[in-house]
Image: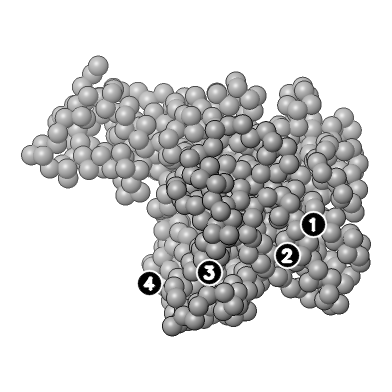
């Protein structure tokens, strides 16, 4: 093994190297990958049906195409085509309709021509495949963040560190004078990085052939990612594309750079030039009103033009936080972590009705589907094993006149039967409200997911539904046995105590994008059906947006795709109600407290309010918090 030369020094220090071990966001040597499946739903269907790789295929939801494979894209079939137009452009196109739940049925199924009036799209098949893919990522890399149904971030920093030390033992020696701020030696002269067939956006500056450790690290990462993509291909048959870079922002842009089945490495010295090739309105959170405002204020959409604007000037026109965020993003600076535990905070199942429904019976049938949908997702989330449980159920509706309302109640028992009973109870309240009818939209959400602490006997009730309950032969964790032996009344008491003495985390936080899009499934306003994370607004990835129309929520300062505006507002509405209901329940159950329940725990970014409907943060009170 050649040893690094010692005359000239690396730009990086021993501290930078060591920080890799802690997944620090402060080291310029960090290496992040973003992997996104190609035409994901289409690939799932091709595999399920054993369709040849070259056959054009699109996945349909009612009349819209939601995924189009690459052979079909050659015929100009796109997600914006209708099924009819797509067949005109490509007569041999194989169209597959997503699986559906049918009102009244217990299980979902694939149907050729499901009826939009009686059916609701089911994404379980894709979620199942998604799970298998993520297992492959997790087996390869200790730190993986699922960003949506078909994409993940991998923090490769520790793996890169390990290979650095293995291949260049000199790096394992203590720094000169034991001073971590000493610069590292340079990588050996003549060292070549292979890049594993990656695309390499051009460098802004010529380094005269002298590599530094950032290049070597990215080369190592390129090999790891090529292997991971190879495993997905070999074990599951799917192709995916990847981006490798210093942070999530650039890695995400990199994965979309060349598709399908390719990978791109955005080297440190290539980052700014690569970014400059995008309009800033193509970056995540800058596609909507915010981006529009900036381009109006500064008279440009060009990212590179905005680089000349000093921070102070941005701050004159924008909130300080937002100005700083924009200032950093256009420079490729992103300090967000790869968070392996982006736990779901709520799950929502919804349907818009065309024609509007007019009977309790119809609404009740839809509730059965919502419950099945939510239960199957909870099973996937480990609620079945009692890992976590939701605390609140909210039923929201919108009438044909546009009036919307929601009602929430605490969930005491997490079984399918119990949840159904709670939902049907909530429905009775809707039935009694004459203003709810005819009903244009119903949605059911469970929220306030709480970690089940080890040994905590207060939480009973796991999602054990029907057959699953009988089949549960796997050994249970100690504590869950204990739970089942606990006398019922005591557990219930503890439950109530827990519900109302601690604020559910979900309610005093700014709704996360995961909450709203990725896991909650956004509701498609056209179809009333839900899809996971519309990729025009990746939840935690930093990305170019789809058609770019965005809106910025006044209340939480989250920027979301325009289509999600209505649901987003419904979401705030439901949370407000839940908060109000909780406060109300607290008054009924808890002994008199010295201060009001809503003031027991300070609200993030807000000194006042809480407890009352519509009393969320005031305009501008919460600032962009997720960057
Ligand atoms: P994407 O990753 O955006 O797209 P894709 O995987 O189909 O294609 P690409 O190769 O360009 O990445 O979305 C992932 C899946 O999410 C997609 O296969 C279907 C689903 N989806 C919807 O259901 N509705 C939508 O509006 C979009 C954009 C995606
Ligand atoms: Ca994809
Ligand atoms: Ca995607």
Residue 218 appearing in the image: yes
Q: Vertical placement of 207 versus 575: above or below? A: above
- Residue 312: mark in rendering: 4
The reply to whether dot 2 and dot 1 touch (C-beta < 8 Å) is yes
Which quadrant of the figure contains the N terminus? Answer: top left
Sequence-wise, the earlier of marks 4 and 1 is 4
- Residue 500: mark in rendering: 3
| Viewer-side label of 1, 3 | 3
Q: Is 134 left or right of 43, judged from the image as shown?
A: left
Helix, strand or loop at label 2? It is: strand
Q: Residue at x 39, y 33 (%)?
A: 218
Q: Residue at x 51, y 45 (%)?
A: 482
- Residue 367: mark in rendering: 1
| Viewer-side label of 2, 3 | 3
Sequence-wise, the earlier of marks 2 and 3 is 2
Q: Is 593 left or right of 54, judged from the image as shown?
A: left
Q: Nearer the viewer, residue 15 or 208?
A: 15
The reply to whether dot 3 and dot 4 touch (C-beta < 8 Å) is no
Q: Residue at x 68, y 50 (%)?
A: 415
Q: Vertical placement of 340 versus 166: above or below? A: below
The reply to whether dot 4 and dot 1 touch (C-beta < 8 Å) is no
Q: Residue furthest left?
A: 177
Q: Is 81 left or right of 308, judged from the image as shown?
A: right
Q: Which residue is mark 2?
A: 395
């Amino acid at each position: 093994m050649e040893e690094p030369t010692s005359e000239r020094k690396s730009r990086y220090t021993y501290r930078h190297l060591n920080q890799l071990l802690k997944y620090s966001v402060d080291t310029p040597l960090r290496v992040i990958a973003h992997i996104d499946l190609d035409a994901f739903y289409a690939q799932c269907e091709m595999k399920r049906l054993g369709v040849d790789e070259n056959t054009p295929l699109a996945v349909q939801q009612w009349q819209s195409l939601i995924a189009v494979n690459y052979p079909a894209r050659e015929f100009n079939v796109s997600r914006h085509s209708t099924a009819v137009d797509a067949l005109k452009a490509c007569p041999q196109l194989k169209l597959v309709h997503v699986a559906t739940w049918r009102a009244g049925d217990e299980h979902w199924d694939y149907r050729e021509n499901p009826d939009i009036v009686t059916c609701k799209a089911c994404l379980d098949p894709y979620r199942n495949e998604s799970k298998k893919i993520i297992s492959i990522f997790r087996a390869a890399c200790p730190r993986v963040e699922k960003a949506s149904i078909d994409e993940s971030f991998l923090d490769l920093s520790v793996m890169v560190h390990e290979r650095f030390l293995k291949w260049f033992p000199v790096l394992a020696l203590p720094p000169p004078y034991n001073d971590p701020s000493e610069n590292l030696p340079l990588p050996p002269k003549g060292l070549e990085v292979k890049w594993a067939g990656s695309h390499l956006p051009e460098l802004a500056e010529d380094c005269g052939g002298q590599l530094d450790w950032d290049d070597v690290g990215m080369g190592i990462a390129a090999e790891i990612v090529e292997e991971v993509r190879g495993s997905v291909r070999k074990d599951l048959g799917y192709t995916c594309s990847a981006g490798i870079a210093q942070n999530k922002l650039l890695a995400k842009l990199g994965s979309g750079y060349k598709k399908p089945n390719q990978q791109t490495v955005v080297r440190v010295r290539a980052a700014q030039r690569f970014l400059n090739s995008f309009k800033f309105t193509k970056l995540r959170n800058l596609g909507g009103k915010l981006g529009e405002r900036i381009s109006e204020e500064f008279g440009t959409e060009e990212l590179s033009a905005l680089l000349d604007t000093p921070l102070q000037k941005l701050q004159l026109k924008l909130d300080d936080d937002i100005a700083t965020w924009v200032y950093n993003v256009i420079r490729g600076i992103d300090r967000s972590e790869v968070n392996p535990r982006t736990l779901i905070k709520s799950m929502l199942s919804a349907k818009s009705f065309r024609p509007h429904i007019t009977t309790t019976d119809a609404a009740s049938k839809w509730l059965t589907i919502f419950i099945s949908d939510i239960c199957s997702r909870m099973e996937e989330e480990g609620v079945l094993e009692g890992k976590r449980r939701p605390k609140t159920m909210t039923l929201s509706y919108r009438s044909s006149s546009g009036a919307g309302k929601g009602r929430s109640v605490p969930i005491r028992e997490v079984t399918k039967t119990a949840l159904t009973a709670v939902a049907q109870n909530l429905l009775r309240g809707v039935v009694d409200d004459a203003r709810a009818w005819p009903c244009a939209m119903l949605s059911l959400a469970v929220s306030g997911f709480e970690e089940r602490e080890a040994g905590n006997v207060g939480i009973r009730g796991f999602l054990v539904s029907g057959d699953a309950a009988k089949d549960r032969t796997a050994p249970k964790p100690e504590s869950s046995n204990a739970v089942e032996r606990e006398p019922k009344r005591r557990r219930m008491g503890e439950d109530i105590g827990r519900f109302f003495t601690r604020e559910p985390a979900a309610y005093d936080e700014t709704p996360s994008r995961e909450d709203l899009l990725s896991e909650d499934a956004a509701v498609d306003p056209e179809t009333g059906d839900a899809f996971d994370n519309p990729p025009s607004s990746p939840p935690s990835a930093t990305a170019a947006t789809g058609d770019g129309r965005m809106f910025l929520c006044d209340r939480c300062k989250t920027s979301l795709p325009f289509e999600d505006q209505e649901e987003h507002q419904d979401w705030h509405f439901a949370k407000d109600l839940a908060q109000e209901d909780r406060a109300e329940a607290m008054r009924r159950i808890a002994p008199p407290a010295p201060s009001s329940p809503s003031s027991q725990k300070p609200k993030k970014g807000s000194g006042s309010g809480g407890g009352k409907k519509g009393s969320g943060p005031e305009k501008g009170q919460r600032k962009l918090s997720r960057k």
